Image: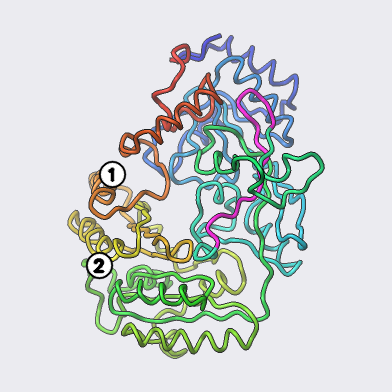
């Protein structure tokens, strides 16, 4: 049976019967109303309805699903928490969705070697609570508590530990397209634990990171965890331009003062407030904040022994002054950003995703984001250019946040806006503008996208690197069953599958 458009009812019946031989039929969803809910997310990726949704509980059920899918050349798309915004989990038409939300066990919390072993359906709220009970924490992204750690960590995360600890993944268990199970890292050795990513052979964990479910399906992972220190403090400093903010965070990182920094645009930190600020409605130019509103706020997380954190708070004030900034007083914080401060406290000191009550007003529009990495020397020029490009097309509000990655070797920059859903013309214009901006960012500002998005135009610019990836995809998945709808490897589709 060739995979093709026009999958018949008889074809579905044959596949359904084989699936039921290995998987409880209650875990196989074929109801039209269920299938439709998996056919889209909030991204512009075209609607695409699967033939089956399977909710496995065990790795063996994933194995059998892939064996059957590979036999009949049926495309398979994997998801876990269901909080999807970028098209990565929109399935192929008439394919299979493997929804791993029921594989939700925390298998181990190892406080000797500081790692946890989890399944893909574990969500952040459960993991952070379990870790806190043992005096530990994990990397927290700017995603809701119902998101999954593996769904985030496998896509190069941005969040609470990015300044020093770029990658949370240690060791993976992966089911390949033909049903073969592969372990990476230290667990490739029989009976050995999941404590080490790099061994005597090449790092295969990295092969499945940023692969978006196109090379294998991760069914278990070991992730880095960190002890909760004796003292934690949040320094909040104000700056009148982005260049000073970048210089400030670089200086702190270079001197090992802090664990993490985030630079917030005035539009973003003000938008946390529960009542949507009037200045966001009247000030359309994102480079010109209202009077007495700092251009940037920088939140700096300090952790360690009490003596260390007290001293480092003083150093933050010294360094802020060096670059023309200042530490905000408690009175200024209460007046300027009470809701934002509450959210940052949850994020940094409580080690969980903030509830972000102030984000309720974001129901006003469609969230659209543009995210890149660049070297610090290039990001300061990119910031003003990117704000101007979005301002030119007439959207409002325009927000961003930015942070150093890997001790400041690169700067992360997320620019975003909210547009009323009924304004289709402006939404389309913003999406076209973002695509054009990636090309300019790469060539003019040496900035690269954070992640691949459906329909990205820059793949052809990475030359032999991309050719090698295509060869790897062909070798691993010759029938191209794993997430072909993403079109990351569209050129290598098997002719029989067209």
Does dot 1 land on a helix, a strand or a loop? Answer: helix
Q: Nearer the viewer, residue 66 or 443?
A: 443
Q: Nearer the viewer, residue 15 or 297?
A: 297
Residue 318 screen position, x and y as percent: 42, 88
Q: Quadrant of residue 176?
A: top right
Compared with 170, 19 (above or below) is above
- Total tally of numbered discs in the picture: 2
Residue 316 screen position, x and y as percent: 46, 84
| Residue 180 belongs to magenta span | yes
Q: Residue at x 69, y 43 (%)?
A: 220
| Left or right: 413 in relation to 99 | left
| Residue 457 belongs to magenta span | no
Q: Residue at x 50, y 43 (%)?
A: 210
Residue 118 screen position, x and y as percent: 70, 49
| Left or right: 382 in relation to 309 | left
**Which of pointers 2 and 1 lies earlier in the amino acid sequence?**
2
Q: Which residue is mark 1?
A: 435
Q: Residue at x 65, y 44 (%)?
A: 120
The magenta segment: 165-181
- Going by the picture, which residue comes out furthest to the right? 191
- Going by the picture, which residue comes out furthest to the front? 200
Pair 2/1: label in front: 1
Mark 1 crowdedness (10 Å alpha carbons): few <14, some 14-19, many ≥20: some
| Left or right: 54 in relation to 239 | right
The image's mark for residue 286 is 2
Q: Residue at x 72, y 29 (%)?
A: 61
Residue 365 visible from this viewpoint: yes
Compared with 67, 430 (above or below) is below
């Amino acid at each position: 049976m060739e995979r093709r458009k026009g999958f018949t009812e008889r074809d579905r019946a044959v596949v359904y019967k084989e699936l039921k031989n290995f998987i409880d039929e209650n875990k196989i969803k074929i109801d039209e109303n269920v299938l439709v809910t998996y056919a889209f997310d909030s991204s512009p990726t075209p609607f695409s309805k699967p033939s089956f949704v399977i909710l496995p509980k065990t790795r063996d059920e994933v194995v059998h699903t892939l064996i059957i899918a590979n036999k009949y050349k049926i495309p398979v798309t994997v998801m876990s928490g269901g909080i999807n915004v970028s098209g990565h989990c929109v399935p192929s038409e008439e394919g299979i969705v493997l929804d791993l939300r029921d594989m939700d066990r925390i298998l181990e919390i190892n406080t000797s070697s500081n790692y946890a072993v989890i399944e893909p359906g574990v969500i952040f709220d459960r993991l952070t609570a379990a870790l806190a009970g043992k005096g530990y924490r994990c990397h927290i992204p700017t995603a809701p508590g119902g998101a999954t750690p593996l769904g985030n960590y496998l896509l190069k995360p941005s969040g609470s530990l990015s300044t020093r600890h770029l990658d949370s993944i240690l060791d993976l268990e992966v089911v390949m397209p033909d049903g073969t199970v592969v372990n990476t890292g230290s667990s490739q050795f029989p009976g050995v634990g999941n404590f080490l990513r790099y061994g005597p052979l090449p790092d295969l964990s990295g092969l499945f990171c940023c692969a978006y479910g196109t090379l294998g399906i991760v069914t278990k992972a070991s992730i880095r965890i960190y002890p909760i220190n004796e003292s934690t403090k949040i320094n909040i400093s104000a700056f009148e331009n982005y260049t000073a903010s970048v210089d400030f965070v670089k200086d702190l990182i270079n001197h090992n003062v802090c664990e993490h920094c985030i630079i917030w645009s005035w539009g973003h930190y003000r938008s946390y407030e529960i009542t949507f600020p009037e200045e966001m409605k009247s000030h359309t130019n994102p480079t010109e904040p209202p009077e007495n509103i700092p251009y940037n706020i920088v939140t700096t997380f300090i952790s360690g022994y009490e003596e260390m954190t007290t001293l480092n708070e003083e150093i933050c004030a010294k360094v802020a002054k060096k670059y023309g900034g200042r530490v905000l007083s408690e009175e200024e914080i209460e007046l300027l950003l009470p809701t934002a401060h509450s959210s940052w406290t949850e994020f940094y000191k409580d080690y969980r995703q903030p509830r972000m009550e102030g984000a309720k007003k974001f129901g006003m529009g469609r969230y659209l984001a543009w995210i890149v990495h660049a070297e610090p020397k290039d990001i300061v020029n990119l910031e003003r250019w990117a704000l101007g490009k979005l301002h030119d097309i007439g959207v409002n509000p325009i927000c961003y946040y930015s942070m150093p990655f890997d001790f400041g070797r690169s700067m992360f920059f997320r620019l975003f806006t909210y547009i009323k859903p009924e304004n289709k013309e402006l939404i389309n214009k913003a999406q076209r503008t973002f695509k054009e901006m990636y090309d300019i960012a790469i060539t003019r500002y040496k900035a690269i996208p954070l992640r691949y998005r459906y329909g990205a135009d820059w793949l052809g610019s990475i030359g032999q690197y991309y050719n090698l990836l295509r060869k790897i995809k062909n070798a691993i998945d010759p029938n191209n069953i794993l997430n072909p709808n993403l079109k990351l490897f569209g050129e290598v589709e098997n002719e029989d599958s067209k």
